[in-house]
Image (cartoon, grey):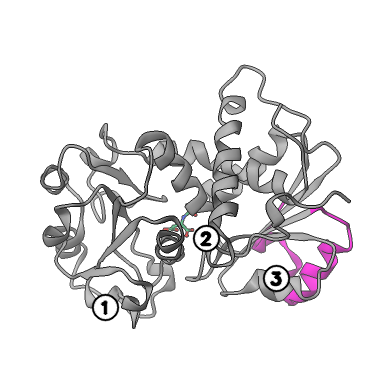
């Protein structure tokens, strides 16, 4: 078995990675972008490799982009969702993991509602590389690599830039992974949220915290909007109403203008238009949302290739 590239046996989270590993994956993703737009979108890089996508939570972008990434590189890709897996019959996560690993896939891509799922499974599945495709509110490393590639392409060097992340910080694995990435990569993160949607001790990440969105706009280079993750909430008391949330924490044209002409807009998707973002901003020239989706495929090609110890893009 070839050694994984960049010393990456698994991809658990940004918090487990070095700056060099992050840069290597982003740069490799950059090299894959062309393959995704040319007429024949196929290379033999991962021929003979097997990738299983095991998703216990809903997904459109992440699951599909891992599938397309694997298939464009000629891997055999199998998708399993929780609703059709034997976990519905009472099988444990460990038994499901061990069962799939016994079929000898090279990579298992896992999304689960529990933090640390991949680390836990890695203790038992010794011959399978694992990629965390989102574990509860903990981490979402390939989304951050996707965002960094998108920023590299549209903003250039992110060093010293300010990203303002707005919304449901408590439940967002994307926010958490960005807070970790910012320290490693040298960008600044501002957090904007109502107190009810802020994790305790958020300051330990070294971010500036704002409760008033308008106060955080000046000096922002990237406005990163988050969906309110009602599926992780236990009550509906986090804010008075959707209308009031949009008033206080929604991104509209006026706020984007106040941030300045250079300011770009990001969102990991899915967007709730009219809640955290208005349609005129979501569809604006400043919006990088669909670029994030496009680059998600390229970055996942890089992630799969690295873990498989695969060759250069062709
Ligand atoms: C995010 C996720 O699942 O964490 N979406 C994604 O992967 N693109 C954010 C969200 O669900 O709101």
Percent across and percent down for residue 119 are 67, 72
Percent across and percent down for residue 54 are 69, 59
Read off the residue under disc 3. Answer: 88
Q: Residue at x 55, y 50 (%)?
A: 62
Q: Is residue 199 above or below residue 161?
A: below
Q: Secondary structure at mark 2?
A: loop
106 relative position to 63: left or right: right
Q: CA distance from mark 1 to mark 2?
A: 22 Å
Q: CA distance from mark 3 to mark 2?
A: 25 Å
Q: Earlier in the sequence, mark 3 or mark 1?
A: 3
Q: Earlier in the sequence, mark 3 or mark 2?
A: 3
Q: Residue at x 76, y 54 (%)?
A: 107
Q: Secondary structure at mark 3?
A: helix
Q: Secondary structure at mark 1?
A: helix
Question: Is there any visible trace of residue 45 in the rendered image?
Answer: yes
The answer to whether the residue bearing label 2 lies less than 8 angstroms from the nearest atom of ligand 1 is yes
Q: State the extent of the magenta-drawn residues as a range.
A: 79-106
Q: Is residue 263 magenta?
A: no
In this rendering, the label closer to the viewer, 1 or 2: 2
Read off the residue under disc 1. Answer: 196
Q: Is residue 196 above or below residue 167?
A: below
């Amino acid at each position: 078995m070839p050694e994984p590239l960049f010393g990456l046996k698994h991809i658990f989270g940004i918090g487990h990675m070095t700056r060099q590993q992050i840069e290597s994956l982003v740069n490799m993703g950059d090299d894959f972008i062309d393959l995704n737009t040319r007429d024949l979108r196929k290379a033999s890089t991962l021929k003979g490799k097997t990738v299983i996508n095991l998703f216990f939570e809903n997904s459109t972008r992440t699951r599909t982009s891992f599938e397309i990434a694997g298939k464009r590189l000629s891997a055999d890709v199998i998708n399993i969702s929780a609703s059709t897996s034997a976990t519905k019959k009472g099988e444990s996560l460990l038994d499901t993991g061990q069962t799939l690993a016994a079929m000898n896939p090279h990579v298992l891509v896992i999304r689960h509602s529990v933090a640390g799922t991949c680390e836990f499974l890695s203790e038992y599945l010794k011959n399978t590389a694992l990629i965390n495709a989102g574990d509860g509110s903990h981490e979402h490393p390939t989304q951050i690599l996707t965002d960094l590639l998108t920023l590299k392409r549209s903003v250039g060097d992110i060093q010293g830039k300010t990203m303002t992340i707005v919304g449901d910080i408590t439940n967002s694995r994307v926010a958490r992974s960005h807070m970790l990435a910012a320290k490693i990569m040298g960008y600044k993160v501002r957090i904007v949220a109502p107190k009810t949607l802020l994790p305790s001790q958020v300051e330990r990440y070294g971010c500036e915290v704002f409760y008033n969105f308008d106060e955080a706009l000046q000096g922002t280079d990237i406005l990163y909007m988050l969906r309110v993750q009602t599926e992780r909430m236990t009550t509906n008391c986090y804010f008075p109403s959707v209308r009031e949330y949009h008033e206080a924490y929604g991104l509209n044209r006026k706020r984007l203008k106040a941030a300045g002409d250079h300011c770009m807009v990001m969102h990991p998707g899915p967007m709730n238009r009219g809640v955290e973002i208005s349609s005129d901003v979501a569809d604006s020239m400043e919006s990088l949302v669909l670029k994030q989706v496009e680059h998600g495929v390229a970055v996942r090609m890089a992630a799969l290739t690295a873990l498989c110890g695969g060759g250069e893009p062709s």
